[in-house]
Amino acid sequence: MLKVRIAVLVSGGGTNLQALIDAQQSGILKSGEIVLVLSSKEGVRALERAAAAGIDSAVVSRKSCASQAEFETRLQAELESSGIELVVLAGFMSILSAEFVSKWQKRIINVHPSLIPSFCGEGYYGLRVHEAALKKGVKVSGATVHFVNEIPDGGEIILQRAVPVYKKDSPESLQRRVMERAEWKLLPRAAELVAKKIRSEGDSYGKHDQ
Ligand code: GAR
């Protein structure tokens, strides 16, 4: 059976990308294949992880683009030239416009390091999410994988997992626990669920109409 062609979009360390690569190697991710890693930043660790796994990568630097429209035109060109069918945002730190997202309905998933609808939306990314959770004093946090729509972190939830918050936590220790216990497990499982659905439903499944 043909595998769904997956692009993973990254901006930094790429530990979630690594979880996807490991899941591919262990057979947890089997309905899709990561054929492209696209980074919005030069020189990040995620690009080294892609190279080590023998996966093609490209950089579309947000900084070097004059506008969001130019950035997205270049992203779209990379995705189309690699025949991508599913986009996985794994620590991708740029918000995508409604126009871009509408071309990829139910074809973009994202991992977010909180239990949505808490601590999400514009301004909530990376360590900031955990700082906000600790400031609020929540006793439980976690991670969410969701479809991406025009509302930042507002698309349909696919998988969610709770993680305890401890009194002694720093943003870094909470981030690590959320990654280890939730993100790195949920993201590969969600990618497999969505890839399997795309493969089984073929062109009729939420296919973008480009
Ligand atoms: C992860 O915790 C991911 O959930 C978060 O950034 C980190 C990236 O780490 N993403 C967001 O906050 C997006 N709103 P990684 O590069 O090691 O996967």
Image: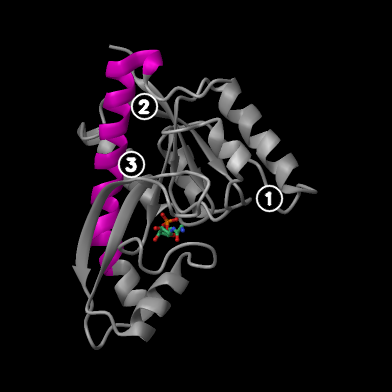
In the rendered image, residue 169, in percent from the top left (x then y), is placed at 28, 83
Q: Which residue in the rendered view is the most extreme toward the bottom?
A: 168
Three-letter amino acid code of the residue under disc 3: Leu
The answer to whether residue 100 is above or below residue 42 is above
Mark pair 1, 2: CA separation: 26 Å
Q: In terms of image quarters, where does ligand 1 lie?
A: bottom left
Which mark is drawn over residue 62?
A: 1
Residue at 54% across / 67% down in the picture?
Answer: 123
Q: Is residue 193 magenta?
A: yes
Q: What secondary structure is found at the residue carrying circle 3?
A: helix
Tell me where the magenta segment starts and ends, as one range.
Answer: 177-204
Which numbered disc, 3 or 1, marks the residue closer to the eye?
Answer: 1
> Is 120 in front, or is 92?
120
Three-letter code for the amino acid on which mark 1 is drawn: Arg
101 w.r.t. 103: above or below:
below
Residue 88, by quadrant, is top left
